[in-house]
């Protein structure tokens, strides 16, 4: 199923990717408005997401942003940072790990993975989209590959805990969580990119 790019908008939550202090994919060459305007000119691939209300739109990286993650290796694991964080007020703490950009020399990403939620799902989570918009971007992930990457296991646990906990209510299987845990044991976010 392809998605009409004119029916997509950024959610306020996804605008964190334009914040220079965000640890993960940072969009520095665009504003939220110019990001969406340029998206309309892109060729895209639509992948099924983890639930019926989720799609992953894959486009070539038109922002020059760097990869938001780096592989954890024997050479850099001593530079891995960790701390308890809260994503938004009212949500449970989670253990976050990240590298400082100076420690891992990130590369420019080849693709952007735009995580989309349907209008109905966002409405259930208290987010209303403008008239004519059917899909909201909830996350932007800079990747080197055009296929889906497992979401963080903490995100899965938050989803399973429900909307009140900051998730979406989707019940992830133990196998999905195990796969995500294995992946994210070997990869970490990159913070501090200029």
Image (tube, grey):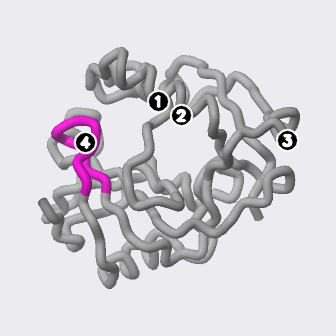
Q: Which residue is mark 1?
A: 180
The answer to whether the residue labelled 1 contacts the one labelled 2, judged by CB atoms less than 8 Å apart, is yes
Residue reaching furthest to the bottom: 41
Q: In the depicted view, which residue is nearer to us: 171 or 88?
A: 171
Q: Which residue is mark 3?
A: 75
Q: Is residue 52 magenta?
A: yes
Q: In the depicted view, which residue is nearer to us: 77 or 93?
A: 77
> Which tag, 1 or 4, sits closer to the chain's start?
4
Q: Nearer the viewer, mark 2 or mark 4?
A: 2
Left or right placement of residue 135 versus residue 28 in this view: left
Rendered residue at 54%/75% (across/down): 63
The answer to whether the residue labelled 1 contacts the one labelled 4, judged by CB atoms less than 8 Å apart, is no
Rendered location of residue 113, percent (x, y): 41, 58
> Which tag, 2 or 4, sits closer to the chain's start?
4
Gap between marks 3 and 2 measured at Cα: 18 Å
Using the rendered view, name the quadrant where residue 19 is placed. bottom right
Gap between marks 1 and 4 measured at Cα: 24 Å
Q: Which mark is residue 51?
A: none
Left or right placement of residue 23 versus residue 103 in this view: left
Secondary structure type for disc 3: loop
Q: Nearer the viewer, mark 3 or mark 4?
A: 3
Give the magenta part as a residue range: 47-56
Q: Which residue is mark 4?
A: 122
Q: Residues within 10 Å of mark 1 (few under 14, many from 20)?
A: some
> Which tag, 3 or 1, sits closer to the chain's start?
3
Rendered residue at 26%/25% (across/down): 170
Gap between marks 1 and 2 measured at Cα: 5 Å
> Which tag, 3 or 2, sits closer to the chain's start?
3
């Amino acid at each position: 199923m392809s998605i009409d790019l004119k029916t997509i908008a950024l959610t306020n939550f996804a605008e964190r990717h334009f914040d220079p202090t965000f640890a993960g994919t940072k969009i520095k060459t665009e504003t939220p408005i110019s990001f969406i305007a340029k998206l309309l000119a892109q060729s895209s691939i639509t992948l099924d997401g983890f639930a019926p209300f989720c799609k992953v739109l894959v486009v070539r990286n038109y922002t020059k942003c760097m990869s938001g993650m780096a592989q954890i290796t024997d050479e850099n694991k001593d530079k891995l940072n960790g701390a308890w964080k809260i994503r938004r007020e009212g949500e449970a703490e989670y253990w976050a790990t990240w590298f400082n950009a100076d420690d891992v020399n990130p590369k420019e990403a080849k693709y952007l993975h735009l995580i989309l939620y349907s209008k109905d799902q966002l409405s259930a989570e208290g987010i209303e989209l403008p008239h004519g918009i059917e899909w909201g971007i909830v996350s932007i992930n800079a990747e080197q590959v055009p296929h889906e990457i497992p979401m963080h296991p903490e995100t899965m646990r938050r989803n399973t805990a429900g909307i009140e906990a900051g998730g979406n209510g989707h019940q992830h299987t133990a196998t999905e969580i195990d796969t995500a845990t294995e992946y994210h044991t070997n990869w970490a976010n990159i913070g501090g990119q200029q």
